[in-house]
Image: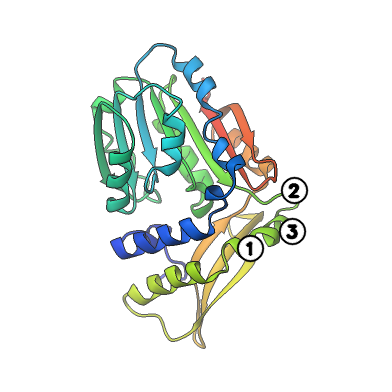
Amino acid sequence: MPTELPASALYSHPSLGRLWKKVHLSCSPFLHRTELQRLYHLPSTRIRKHFGHRSYSLLALGCADGTKESLLLKKLPKPTSLLALDANLSLARRAARRLPAFQKSAHRTDLTSSLSLQFIPSRLRTHPTLITLFGVLPNLNPLPLLRSISRFMKKDDLLLFSANLAPGTKGRLGAIRVLPQYDNPPTREWLETAVGQLRPRLPKGRLEFGIFSDPKQNSLARIEARWISQRKTFTVFSSRRPTSSQVETWIRTTQLRKLACYLDPLGEEGVWLVTRKA
């Protein structure tokens, strides 16, 4: 068994999807701060200008139940086609029901796989595509995922993604400020249920939260929930909390070009609109 649980395993079963939703409803700052919700309205003007009067498709990656995508689409024309993708199929189907489009479909996918974008239906590619990636990037290795999306994009496509940030310029200190958003009873219930469903079973232990350096980028702060037992330590959950300048570096490194950036006044979340470099 690996020493770190894949992020997709936390959402793959319907019961885990329901527990994640409970965490989201009770602990997510997004639902309780209008400044964060506004971040998902703001890009619509720039997106409208980019597409003009052309039809477009929407590819919602890691969409969960489509809450953030729905805020954006209230300000945009209805997409010609919608494909909702998530590790939890029931959540992806819920997103497809919620979001407006002339044609809709939902599928289960694992964004940690390099093959996750290769089955996209050809009809989705007949128009410029708006790709959304909300709330996903902190839980996955960001550079491989952004590179994969960049290779998939056509020259007129747009990617709108969000990142949960470490406030300020010092990642570790910023991550300490937001740690209570993770270390709380609903999140513990969700993660401990995921541990209980693992096969082979983990030895008896306890769940502990802490802040560590990301193994792929030492300067990047990562909040982790670790299962501690006498025999081994197993990482159940991780969430990268980059600074905004680190996200800008990811964009440049993955051959994407920034069109706009929208930041939370408290510095806890940001939304970036990018396109592929020519």
The reply to whether dot 3 and dot 2 touch (C-beta < 8 Å) is yes
Kindly identify the amino acid type of the residue bearing the numbered disc 1.
Answer: Leu
Kindly identify the amino acid type of the residue bearing the numbered disc 2.
Answer: Gly
Tell me residue 104's x, y (percent): 25, 34
Real-space Cα distance between discs 1 and 3?
10 Å
Residue 193, above or below 51: below
Residue behind mark 1:
179
Residue 111, above or below 48: below
In this rendering, would 142 be left or right of 180? left
Residue behind mark 2:
168
Tell me residue 33's x, y (percent): 59, 46
Q: Residues within 10 Å of mark 3 (few under 14, many from 20)?
A: some
Residue behind mark 3:
173
Nearer-N-terminus badge (1/3): 3
Tell me residue 124's x, y (percent): 28, 27
In this rendering, would 49 be left or right of 96? right
Viewer can see residue 13: no
